[in-house]
Amino acid sequence: MYVPEIAKLNGGAAHKTLAALRAEYDQYRTSGLALDIQRGRPCAEQLDLAAEMLDWGNAPYICEDGNDARNYGGGIEGTPEARKLFADLFGVGQKNVIAWGNSSLNLMYDLLVKAMLSGVCGAEKPWLAQASESGEKLKFLCPVPGYDRHFLMTETFGFEMINIDMGPGGPDMDAVERLTAADHMIKGIWNIPKYQNPTGITYSDETVRRFAALKPKAKDFRIFWDNSYAVHDLYDEPDELLNLLEEAKKRGNEDMVYMFASSSKITFAGGGITALAASEKNITHIAKQLSVQTICSDKLNQLRHVRYIKDMAGLSHIMKIHASLLRPKFELVLGILSEEFRGEEFQGEDFQGEDFRGGGGGMPGDICAWTCPRGGYFISLDAPDGCAKETLRMAAEAGVKFTPAGATFPRGVDPRDRNIRIAPTVPSAAELGVAIKVLALCIKIAYLKSKVQ
């Protein structure tokens, strides 16, 4: 239920409202709900769109370069067809692309390991050797709230992870510039620059240009630019992202950039193809390293993907269908949040043309705020300080599981215990509606409990 001016409730009014909310909560808790919306995955209807890729029949298996996709052979950088498709997606030359396996996360992990053990292109020593000689820890910058799987990688390798606050146009670039210029052990930074996970923001042109112009003390510093949602627009007028590699090239910094993309949320999650875009020097260096660990990439998977997607026009058509499936779910969530915390009916066009982006900001409610993304897979909600863990504990007890509190911060520690990531993509509209109503109810209870205790 909507609670007018909930932030002003005190004393007996707060206790009375809390009792009413708890009675409503008990009805959900005893109703046998079993909803799980913890991860941002494609729904079954999205996966069905690419079903034709599973039946090739007697399709020709010869790639443009004459290699049989069923056999060894071909360049370690991937098939010409896949490299061209990703080059067009990245907005770079084909020589700047390696098309690889099924997971961009795996490629990022691989490049981290190579940097630690063998060093990056042009470096005198590997990262681990530098840490051993200096007695200092390797460090990585982590925009927050951010992607838990990024943070898990650097945590696993023992990096000191430094939080960088997200703002409306991207990470706090004053902090990024200051920190990287002063510390040679800061070796990289995580980024999801378009429809960021979880805030849904897109980096501003100024932010991209400041990244391109960085002058880090570590000459082997790398920008990990995970453009996971490059084409995952929900509306016909998408956010535009400046090309980091081209901007860095203008400043002689192109070797600092690793750009990633994949088809995991275009075709099959876990069964797609991925790619790296980087300077030609980096591509040559990395291809040489990859040739030690494998003979060739999965040409069959690359070939069938290109024949399904075809080109950028084909990709645009496919993604418009994805958008038609996901947009109603996002607007349903935003509508319920608006009704529960602002006491008014929400329409999808309410946020069109306005800027409610930014970690910790967004659409303001009575006691919390949320982002209104124009693409991607997530909505970021900030509950009142100190309430996220209790909110999600109660939701789970009522049968609704969300991404754990703190997951959007390194080591799972949200210093303000407020950020909640909402992944609207998998559930049906009916399930999603119930889940968000339960979430809103738990936020109100957690907030009032903190006031009356």
Image (spheres, rainbow, N blue to C red):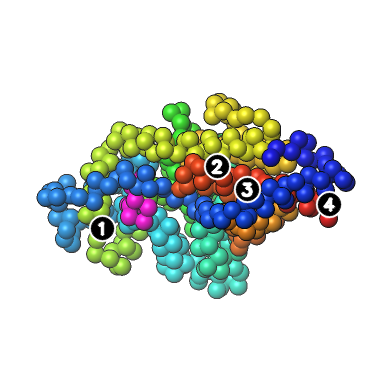
The residue sitting at 43% across, 57% down in the picture is 105
Q: Which mark, by number, is residue 298?
A: 1
Amino acid at dot 4: Val
Write down the residue under mark 4.
Answer: 452
In the displayed structure, 13 sits above or below 302; it is above
10 Å neighbourhood of mark 1: few (<14), some, or many (≥20)?
many
* Label 4 Cα neighbours within 10 Å, binned few <14 / some 14-19 / many ≥20: few
Q: Secondary structure at mark 1?
A: loop
Name the quarter where the N terminus is drawn: top right
Magenta-colored stretch includes residue 430: no
The CA distance from mark 4 to mark 3 is 20 Å
| Picture quadrant of residue 185 | bottom right
First-in-chain label (2 vs 1): 1
* Magenta stretch bounds: 266-274
- The amino acid beneath tag 2 is Gly
Secondary structure, mark 4, is helix
Q: Which mark is residue 366?
A: none
In depth, the one of 10 and 292 nearer the eye is 10
Q: Percent x, y for residue 359?
A: 62, 44
Q: The disc labelled 1 sits on which kind of residue?
A: Asp
- Tell me the residue that label 2 is attached to: 433
Residue 194 image offset from top left, x and y in percent? 49, 41
Question: Dividing the picture into quarters, in which one does residue 151 lie?
Answer: bottom right
Q: Is residue 369 left or right of residue 273?
A: right
**Residue drawn at (29%, 45%) of the image:** 50
User: Which amino acid does the dot numbered 3 rest on?
Assistant: Leu
Q: Which residue is mark 3?
A: 439
Work out whether residue 210 can be spotted.
no
Residues at marks 2 and 4, CA–CA distance in whole angstroms: 29 Å
Q: Nearer the viewer, residue 174 or 43?
A: 43
